[in-house]
Amino acid sequence: MTKLADEFTSRGNKFFHHPEALEGLRNGKPKPVVSHIMLTDVCNHKCAFCSVQSRDGQSLSPDVVKGYVAQLKPLGLKAVILSGGGNPILYKNGGWDFNDAVNFLHGEGLEIGVITNGMPLVDYKDGGGNVRRSWKNVHPDTLDKLTWLRISMAGLDHKEKEVFVPDIDPTKTTLGFSYVAHDIYEVPEEPHHGKVSTPEDMRQWGQPKSIRTFEERVPELTLEISEYVETFQPRYVRLLPNCLEPSLIALRCQRLQQMADAIHPGIVFVQYKPPEAPKNCWLGYLHPVLNCDGYVYPCDSCVLNKDAHHKFAVPWRVCRWDEIGELYSKPASSLIKDTKKLCPGCVFTRSNEILQGVVDGNPFPTPEPAEHPNFV
């Protein structure tokens, strides 16, 4: 399902909808198109596949969010993605919550995408007595301001055994689901129990108490995901392997493709982005990532590099949030100088290769129509 992957993952095909940004990159004056803003690292889940092993309870202040956007909007910023090493709908800081952040960004004329695990649902009543279900800390009208919403199906692997899906107006917001194939390890002695599930991470804590492999769970997962597709009619469901275990990616993708074909091949697709160091790192100019620590990173896959130890680490910092405008005032150069050493875990190599071609002077192809073209 290459078409679905092109529409709903960052594969580089949408770059050519933004010739002004590409011309800027080629001429040494790059422009942003979309930015991740990771509001908080607070999360309600401890996912076995999560690339962020430990959390410090960090959240961006409203002033940081406002100041960051104020620097990028004049340069061409069109959209933001609220996600994180945490659950963005749990965000609270300085009198703001998730609703306030969305209201601000929507008021700035930006398109908004959200990636979340969700939360339990409650009923909201409007003035006319109509009831609409939403997460207990997200107003229904906030949902209507989102361009798209991707809900992780991680709840299937947690004690709730459920994915909490609010009432989405499909005329306003595109609904998608995502599921990561992974083995479930139980190691109570491990201080970050459940957050990172590779055997190497847990070796120092002895043998796992019990393991439920992905293969064992395929039949039940296929049925469960099928029920959500039938009930909620999402625009897509993305299946992908645990990127922390690169040796299993190819095999897991084959199994996931079998699941996709069994569930609904017109809706379910497999994301296959094996890690490989790019020649140069350009993606962060068009798509910078502001983490909740207040620093900007070139992408959100830098945490997958082994030496990063499952966190947004110092060697991958591009600049501080209040220096982002200065970054764009300087001639463009590879954001990571030694990609071979620092970025063997990059899953955006294809995107960086496309941008390398732009820098090298390759002609721009005519882009095909795409959903959400501002989310490159």
Image (cartoon, rainbow, N blue to C red):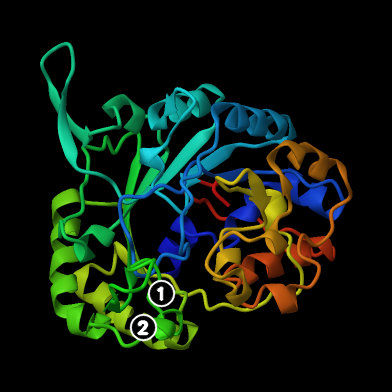
* Picture residue at 45% right of the left edge, 81% below the top: 245
Asked if the residues shown at circle 1 and circle 2 are in contact, with their CB atoms under 8 angstroms apart, the answer is yes
Mark closest to the chain's N terminus, 1 or 2: 1
Name the quadrant containing residue 224. Answer: bottom left
Give coordinates of residue 156: x percent, y percent: 20, 62
Instruction: Say what secondary structure mark 2 lies in.
Output: helix
> Is disc 1 surrounded by few (<14), some (14 to 19) or many (20+) residues within 10 Å?
many
Q: Which residue is mark 1?
A: 242
Question: CA gap, disc 1 to disc 2?
Answer: 9 Å
Given residues 78 and 3, the one toward you in this image is 78
Most extreme residue toward the top is: 127
Q: Would you say 12 lies left or right of 156 here?
A: right
Q: Secondary structure at mark 1?
A: loop
Amino acid marked by disc 1: Asn
Please give the residue where the numbered disc 2 appears in the rendered image. Answer: 252
> Measured from the top left, where is residue 137 in percent x and y?
28, 32
Q: Which mark is residue 315?
A: none
Q: Nearer the viewer, mark 1 or mark 2?
A: 1
